[in-house]
Amino acid sequence: MNYNVFFSPTGGTEKVIQYIGRNFSCPENIDISKTDLPNYVMNADDFCIVGVPSFGGRIPKIAAMRLRQINGNHTPAFLLVTYGGRAYEDTLIELKDILEMQGFICIGAAAMVAEHSIVRQIEAGRPDEEDYKELDHFIIEIKKRLQDEVCPIEVPGNTPYKEYKVLPMEIRASEHCIKCGLCAKKCPVSAIPSENPKVTDAEKCISCMRCVKICPLQARSGNPAKVEMISEKLQKICQPNRQNEFF
């Protein structure tokens, strides 16, 4: 059995995971953003494609926690990290460490540039056609590795990992909110109460921007001052046209 495993609040990581999965006939999707995620146990003849976005150079904390509900048994895995043009820092090595502790063998990995989830003009449209062409070549390599003796890979990053920090975006709802409850239902950390979805619990919120992305009336947004501050900072430090990396 093959599996797509992903944490993808705004859909970018899932899109790449599904693309890879189609090349391996992955029939089962495991969305670890779901709050009712069951435990999984996989076998040595299974294959997992696991993808997460980089949040400030780390795995989103809730994604790291839920990955520990998935256990392998010498199960080969392909790792994907997406990041918005700045740097993925310790995200890939953290993902590899978690999966190896859970019984997986990491046989390949990719760090791919994607449109930034907060400042969407940064790396807008990525991954693009050229990115997917690069990925196609690497998928061929992964298929070869699966046919040979499975061997673990090395990926860049530091241990101990950098400090985990969440950018407090102060998500708020406007007067256009009709309390449909979609944001509360889909929030991966239950930071939005279903009885009053205009409220966001700042202590729980991880600034993943899912509620902003999926609101049918575009009634949710981050604090404009915070968004502007982050936009100015990232535009100064992000290098345009960052290259993907494959391991």
Image: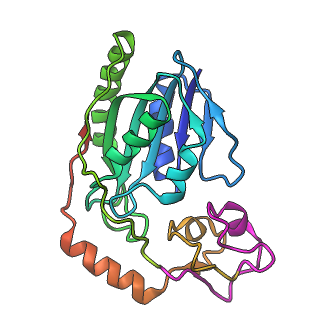
- 75 on left or right of 233: right
**Of residues 151 and 196, which is closer to you in this image?**
151
Residue at 74 percent across and 74 percent down: it is 193
**Of residues 112 and 38, which is closer to you in this image?**
38
The picture places residue 76, in percent across and down from the top left corner, at 44, 24
Residue at 28 percent across and 29 percent down: it is 153
Magenta span main SS = loop
The picture places residue 38, in percent across and down from the top left corner, at 70, 42
Query: In the rendered image, is residue 127 in sight?
Result: no
Question: Which quadrant is home to the N terminus?
Answer: top right
Residue at 33 percent across and 14 percent down: it is 144
In reply to whether residue 165 is colored magenta, the answer given is: no
Residue at 65 percent across and 74 percent down: it is 217
Question: Which quadrant is home to the C terminus?
Answer: top left
Question: Number of labelled discs?
Answer: 0
106 over 228 or under it: above or below = above
Q: How was the colour assigned to the protein in this rendering?
A: rainbow
- 217 on left or right of 76: right
Q: Residue furthest top?
A: 148
> Over which residues does the magenta segment extend?
169-197
Query: In the rendered image, is residue 81 in sight?
Result: yes
- 115 on left or right of 13: left
The picture places residue 204, in percent across and down from the top left corner, at 59, 72
- 111 on left or right of 22: left
